[in-house]
Image (cartoon, rainbow, N blue to C red):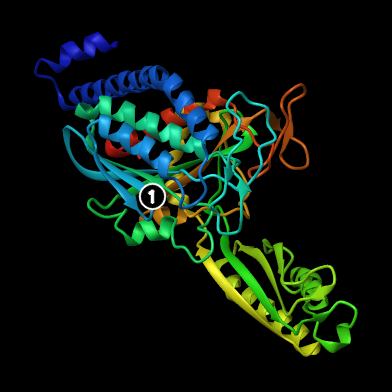
Amino acid sequence: MNWQTLKTLCKAPVELPIMLACLLSLSLETSAQAYSDIDTAAERVEQKVIEWRRQIHQHPELSNREIKTAALVADHLLSLGLDVTTEVGVHGVVAVLKGGQPGDKVIALRADMDANAVKEMQTLPFKSTRIDETWPEGAVPVMHACGHDGHTAMLMGAAEVLAAMREQIPGTVKFIFQGAEEGPPGDEEGGGSMMVREGALENPKPNMVFAIHLAPSPNNAVGYAKGNALANSYKLSIKIAGAGTHGSAPWAGKDPMPVGAEIISALAQIYRQVPANEALTLSIGKVIDEGRFNIIGSNLTLVGTLRVLNNDLLQDIKMRVERIASNIAEAHGQTAEVVWEQFVPAVYNDPEWVIRMLPTLERVVGATNVFEGPPSLGYDDASEFINPIGGLYIGLGAQDSEFGGPAGIRPIEGGKGIYYNHSPHFYINEEVLVTGVRLHVNTVFDFLNGKI
């Protein structure tokens, strides 16, 4: 029986089984047309998305400094007739689109806007050459080395597509453009937790949150992990107090430098104190000293990050770090204090949400392009939005890579290579941006129409 025959039957009195078949078939036909319309609309905004991405990439802004990026976003959302709130959690932007069809469900889409203190090594006509002179830690180069320029542009494109089809939307869409995902500097507040405190998840409260992160996996491949997809994260500072002296007479003071070196070496032993199948990493990325080539300073600070996948192991690891630092310093007649800051909870992908989302993901990119991967020790404070509500966090492949090799992916011969997020060589292939738009819009359509 074809579509036209069913339409004809549905107009006349029929038995219940035929009527149910009519309704189901018409629903499928309507959905198929809607998905086709979404793809067409996404293609229409593709060039805009690429242009927005390039503009943001060429003019990157660090955490809590996303003034021009936020203005670009807010101006676009206002032009679409959305209800827009700015300066949420410093420079965050929240917009609400109310659909034209009855429906009480609300879905939130989230993107991050900030860049990294990294010097770009890619050769691009829109390469960043920006230096931020206002950064609390001193002048630093700025680059979008984590794909946030693409995240922002994709969600701007999705907002335009959804605004154009608002009369077909049964419910509400909330757009969350977040600043300071990379962590606010110094003693500043910011990021996802601050946006939540300032009401980003209220008025209206979402029933689902969806977020995309661009990744070095194969172009247009969608990866996900069940459970904790990304790690719990802390920034830590180990503050060692010694006593300064002349470099020629170390015995006249208390040199904190050897203490710092011993602590860094000893922290590596934590891996041998917990089960080997527990994923964690502890990295010291910066050493702050008061000394000079001929001066031993009084104080030394080690700054780094702790990542732990298992929530139940987090406090145990913190205790071990504090014990190591304190005991080594005491052995040298000095003191060491560990300060824990900027906690970000693990991104939790509830397995039930994964199951609900898989049909949508597979329809958009193809079943063979959707894969379950291992959890990552990276972090993302998208967890502040997803964890209390429910939803899904996925990775969208955007580099010249293919599946295989010891690391799970390998570079394609003749391609641009694989460069992980935060590398000065990080890049994204812009042809995947329209896929990101489609993923956002299809997720909205399916969730608000009861298909997720």
Residue 221 on image: x %, y %:
57, 32
Foreground pick, 303 / 306? 303
Residue shown at 75% from the left, 85% from the top: 243
Is any atom of residue 356 visible in this view? no
The amino acid marked with disc number 1 is: His
Location of the N terminus by quadrant is: top left
Tell which residue pokes out farthest to the left in this image.
Answer: 13
Q: Could you say whether the residue bearing mark 1 is in a helix, strand or loop?
A: loop
Residue 200 on image: x %, y %:
32, 53
Residue shown at 26% from the left, 55% from the top: 202
Residue 402, picture quadrant: top right
Residue shown at 79% from the left, 74% from the top: 266
Foreground pick, 328 / 243? 243
Q: Is residue 447 above or below residue 231?
A: above
Q: Is residue 338 above or below residue 147?
A: below
Residue 129 on image: x %, y %:
61, 35
Q: Is residue 368 left or right of residue 284?
A: left
Tell which residue pokes out farthest to the right in this image.
Answer: 248
- Residue linked to disc 1: 91
Residue 370 on image: x %, y %:
55, 34
Q: Is residue 58 left or right of residue 257?
A: left
Is any atom of residue 13 visible in this view? yes
Foreground pick, 373 / 109? 109
Foreground pick, 10 / 286? 286
Local crowd size for mark 1, using a 10 Å CA cut-off: few (<14), some (14–19), many (≥20): many
Q: Is residue 87 above or below residue 148?
A: below
Q: Is residue 182 above or below residue 365?
A: below
Location of the C terminus by quadrant is: top left
Q: Is residue 362 left or right of residue 218?
A: left
Residue 278, picture quadrant: bottom right
Q: Is residue 194 left or right of residue 297?
A: left
